[in-house]
Amino acid sequence: MDDARLVAHWDRMALHFDKMIAPLERRVIGDARDWVASRVGGRTLELAIGTGLNLPHYPAALELTGIEWSPVMLDKARARADSLGRSVRLFRADAARLPFDDTSFDTVVCTLSMCCIPDDDGALAEASRVLRPGGRLLLVDHVASTVAPVRWGQRAVEHFTIPSQGEHFTRRPLPKLAGHGLRVVDTSLRALGIIERVEAVKPA
C-alpha cells in the first residue's frame, strides 16, 4: 500500500476515529496517556498526533509540537487544541522524515501510532536524531500479545489490516531502540501483553 493511499485511508478514519477508539480507551489502553503525560518535559514533539487525543492529558505549560501526515487528522488536532486553549505547533510531516534540526527536542512521544507508520525504523531513527543528549523517548503501542491464542489472532488479523490500511498488530518497537542509539530505562506490558509502554533515553 503506497503512502498516498495510506494518507487517504487515515483522512477517512479521522471522521469517526475518536468514537471508534473510545471503547478501547476504557478497556485496553487504560491510563497509558496519563502515563506518557506524567513523563514529558521541556520541548516535546509528538509523532503522529492524530486527532490530538493526548492533548487534554499534557501539562498546561508544556512546549508542544505535533506532526501528522493526514491533513484531516491534523485539522481535528488543531480544533481540539483550540477548544482546550492549548498552544501547540502543528505540522503536516512524515515521522520518518522530520522537518526539524538535530537535537531539537527534550522529549519525543508516539502513542498507538508506530504500529501504522510504514517506515517504523526510519521514524525511530528520526526520533533519536531530533532528541538532545539526555532526551527521552516515550512510546505506547499495541504489540504481539504474550498470550499465545491472542497473538495467533493478531497475526491472522494482520493478513487483512497490513495490506488494506498498513496496520500492524504484532510489530514491536522496543527491540529496535538500541540500534538507534537509545537506552531503555522502563517498560511494562498491560492488557494480556498487548499494550506496551516504553521509556528510553538518548545517552549524553
Image: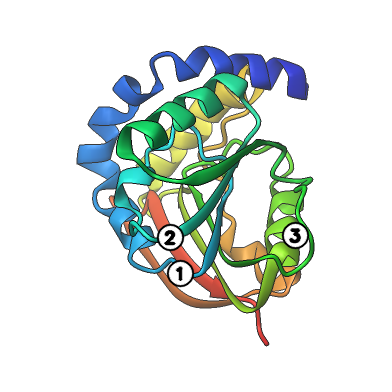
The answer to which of 189 and 140 lies nearer the viewer is 140
The type of residue carrying mark 1 is Gly
Q: Distance between the residues labelled 2 and 3?
A: 24 Å
Which class describes the residues within 10 Å of circle 3: few (<14), some (14-19), or many (20+)? many
Residue at the (69%, 44%) spot, across then down: 95
How far across and down, in percent of the image, does residue 30 sit? 24, 48
Pointer 3 with pointer 1, Cβ within 8 A? no
Q: Mark 3 points at which residue?
A: 125
Q: Earlier in the sequence, mark 2 or mark 1?
A: 1
Pointer 2 with pointer 1, Cβ within 8 A? yes
Q: Earlier in the sequence, mark 3 or mark 1?
A: 1
Res 173 → quadrant: bottom right
> Of discs 2 and 1, which sits in the foreground?
2
116 shown above or below 164 = below
- Where does the N terminus fall, quadrant-wise? top right
Residue at the (38%, 44%) spot, across then down: 55
The answer to which of 77 and 60 lies nearer the viewer is 60
- Give left or right: position of 26 versus 148: left
Residue at the (32%, 31%) spot, across then down: 83
The type of residue carrying mark 3 is Ala
Callout 2: helix, strand or loop?
A: loop
Q: Mark 1 points at which residue?
A: 41
Callout 1: helix, strand or loop?
A: loop
Q: Mark 2 points at which residue?
A: 62
The answer to which of 110 and 174 lies nearer the viewer is 110
Res 186 → quadrant: bottom left
Q: Is residue 192 visible?
A: no
The type of residue carrying mark 2 is Leu
How far across and down, in percent of the image, does residue 96 sit? 75, 46
